[in-house]
Each structure stands twice: as C-alpha cells, then as structure tokens.
Image: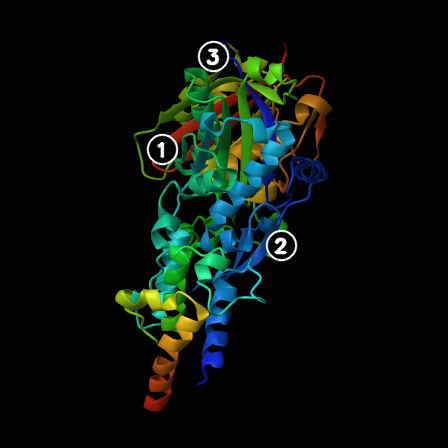
Amino acid sequence: MSSSRIVITGVGLTAPNGNSLAEFRANLLAGVAGIERMEIRYMGSQLAGVCHFDALRHQKKKEVRVGTRAGSISIYCAREALADSGIAWDAVPKDRVGIYIGCTEHGNVETENEIYNISKFNYDTKFWSHYHNPRTVANNPAGETSLNLGVTGPSYTIGAACAAGNMGLIHATQMLRLGEVDLAICGGVSESIHTFGIFAGFKSQNALATHEDPHKASRPFDKARNGIVISEGGALYTLERLDDAQKRGAKIYAEIAGYHVNSDASDYVLPNPTRQAECIRSALSRAKLEPRDIHIVNTHATATPLGDIQECEAIRAVFGEGCPDTSINNTKSYIGHCMGAAGALELAGNLPSFDDLVVHPTINVDDLDPQCALPGLVLNQPRKVEKVDTILNNSFGMLGINSTLIVKRFVP
Amino acid sequence: MTKDECKKLVLDIIADIAPDEDLSNVKPEVRLRDQLQLDSMDFLDIVMELRKRHGIEVPEKDYVQLASLDSCAEYLTPKFDALAGKN
C-alpha cells in the first residue's frame, strides 16, 4: 500500500426513480419523483418508494427465493458497480476484496413474514422457516453479496440507522487506508418498505407523510411537510486506493476528501443540531477545507417538522452567510427516505455535478418554511453553477448517530 | 394415490424450491442430489412443504427416504393413503 488517497471508481444503484446512475440523475434534473401507493400488511395502502430493478439480472430464481430483498438489492448494486468500474473482475484476488454495507436495520422483514406465516398454522412453530436465521443475521446483505460474487475477504454490514449509507463509504476508506483490502464494495441498502413495523412505528411517532399525490408527499423544507416517506433502495460503490485505480486506468468519479462520525448522546429520536454542526465542522477540518470551499451540501432532511429545522440550524451555524458558492439541496424530496441507503444514494445523485456543473434541486417546495430558508437552497429547478469541486453529504440517524462525508473532484 | 401421482406432488414441490432446474427429465431411480442442484436446506424445504401442503410429517430419521423420486413414492404414498383414509 502506498497511497492514502481513496477514490470512487464505480457506482451501482437502485432508487425508486432509477436503476442506474444515468437514469437516476436524469430524473433528478427533470424533477421526476418515484413515490407510489403500496399495500402494507395490517395497515392498508401507504406511500412508499419502491425500486423496480430486475433481480434476475444477477441472481438465480432460487437465490431470490432463499435470500432477502436487502440481499437482492445489494447484489444488484454490487454487480452494477463492478461492471461500471471496468475492473477485470475475474482476475481480482477475491480475498483482497471487502464488502461493507450500511443498514438501518435488518431482520424485521423476515421476522414479520415468519410470524405472519405461522399465524396461518395456529402459531405452531414447526412451520417456522429453517431459512429464518440466515435471512435475519445482521450481516445478511453483505453475506449474500459475498456468496454471489465469490468474495472471500471481509464482508459485513454496518448498523448505523439512517447514517449507514455514508458509514459504508467511510468504513471502506478506513479499511483501504489500513491495507486490509485492495478493493472495497461499499455503501448502503434498505428493504424497509417490506416491514409494516417501520411504517407503524413512524405513524405512532406522527412522523409518516401523507399526501393525495404520492409524488408530492416527501417535501423537506416546505411549510406543509408532514413526515417521512419510507423507501427501499441501494447504492454501492467500488473504492480503491488512487495508485491502484491509476494503474488500471480507471475512470475516477471523485476522491474521498474527508469525513466525520459522532454521536448526540442526547435523545433516542430527536436530532441535536449542536452535534450535527460539530460533525460537519470536523469533516471539513479533516478535509482541510473551509465552509466556503464546499459547493454542494446535500442535506439529510427527511421532511419531519422538527428535524428539518434542526438540520437547517446546524447548517446555518457552519455555513452562515459567508458561502456564496455553496448550493444546498435534498434528494429525499424525489425518492423518500431510503433509510440505510439514503446517504449512499444521495451522494450518487450529486456526483455527476462534477461533470455537468448542475445542482439538482429540492422539489416539492411550494411554500418554503422560513425556518428552513438557507442561503444557497436550490428550490424546484436545477441550478447551473460555475464550479463544483466539492460535495458534502450529511446523513443522520436515530439514537443520535451523525455522519458527514466530503468528496472532491479528482485532480491528479 | 398411485405412486406416479405421488411423484408428481413431490416434483411440484421441487419445482417451487428449485425454480432454475429443468425437471423434465428427472430419473426416478437416481438420487435427486445427483441430478439436481439441491442442498440440505432444500431437503428441509421438501419436508416443510409436505407438512404445509399435505399435512405429512417426515421425521429426521426418515429423511433418507426422500433420496430419489422412487424412494419418495415408496415412502410417501402410504402416508398420503393413510391421510386420505382418515378423511
């Protein structure tokens, strides 16, 4: 290992409005959301972000039947990322590959399914599936991916609530720098729309979005926002040390510039803007950047009344008025909250800005909440800018975990 | 129930648990594992589906009886008949 510089060389994703980076990006620039109605067990019709990728593109039918939705999403994203990276996969030593996948949670879907299943048999547990344990272990999405790809290096998930997508990339960066692996497949996934418990939990918190038009339901920063739209999805990247990437002539999307992870230590669910601001500042410090050097801030805002205001408070504290070249946007307004995939997907949607110099907007803002009126907020229409050299991506999660990841334009 | 009908029920289960397999030429006398991609978890699936769909219990000591279609028919047909008799 000779380089501590880590670069992104491949992207594979599935979002409620696109199954490739190109499709996803085109829809982000065209204002196309991807929210629909879905029947949720015990709850009836609910709003959800549903992905429509073809699982059989990279899995056998039996793999889909035996595995989990999170496993399918992971395998799809991993295979697409590897193809995008142009790496000669057959020649890659599989024991030098790491798979690091962020998850908000795992196992709820499969456990609920089994309880429902045995309810049809008078709750006789002899009808409980022998696949329950491999389906519900916390490393399932990464493990299924390792099976599909034949990866024999470390493969595991990182549980970090809704900060998990960023955490996958951050952990991969650390492992590459330590020389633990030579290639990392990393990011985040979520299958959360298949568990009624997540919907019911947010509903009990009065935090589940409602709107007669599904595409208008997720509306961060709008005065009339009324909660979260729950979504599934995934985004996995190939990360490599710069010298390895250059050696094989890889296309480089971006370089990891800095990151930080911290904890609120203040509440189970309520965010803490002071700690969020600390997280952002520490990431900037590690990247040796000033707030004014950041050209795009992608917010975590989930469209809860309080959460959006608190993140805006944190962003205001760091970026204030002295950052005329900083644009601020939000991706959940299109795709809802993809939970463990959110940070990774939201970063992906902004990466093409390095090339096209366009910042995708936050849509569904008909009446901007004055408490969310940040300078630089890009509302409803894409903004052409002169320069995009840096992107700062926030992802925060329950129990007060905060993550900020900064990527920069690759300059040799 | 005839033994052929019994084999058909077993094949229906295998079609669901091994959906990538071509079952058009399964040789009844040859071990299923020797001609299809089936592992031990799949055999547990066969046991589970017999229980769920047909109310038939196969104790662990008898799993060996599920090795081939022929042995399945030998072992399961009397169980199906016994159930039918009960009903």
* Residue A1 circle label: 3
Task: Classify residue A407 by image quadrant.
Answer: top right
Residue placed under numbered mark 1 in the picture: A400
Q: Closest to the observer: B25 or A35?
A: B25
Question: From mark 2 to mark 1, how far is it between C-alphas?
Answer: 32 Å
The amino acid sitting under disc 2 is Asp
The amino acid sitting under disc 1 is Gly
Q: Residue at x 57, y 51 (%)?
A: A50
N-terminal of the pair, mark 2 or mark 1, is: 2
Q: Chain of mark 3?
A: A
Task: From the image, state whether disc 2 or disc 1 is nearer to you.
Answer: 1
Q: Is residue A3 left or right of residue B81?
A: right
Residue A379, percent from left and from top: 65, 34
> What colour scheme does the image use?
rainbow
The amino acid sitting under disc 3 is Met
Question: From mark 3 to mark 2, how far is it between C-alphas?
Answer: 52 Å
Q: Chain of mark 2?
A: A
Task: From the image, state whether disc 1 or disc 3 is nearer to you.
Answer: 3
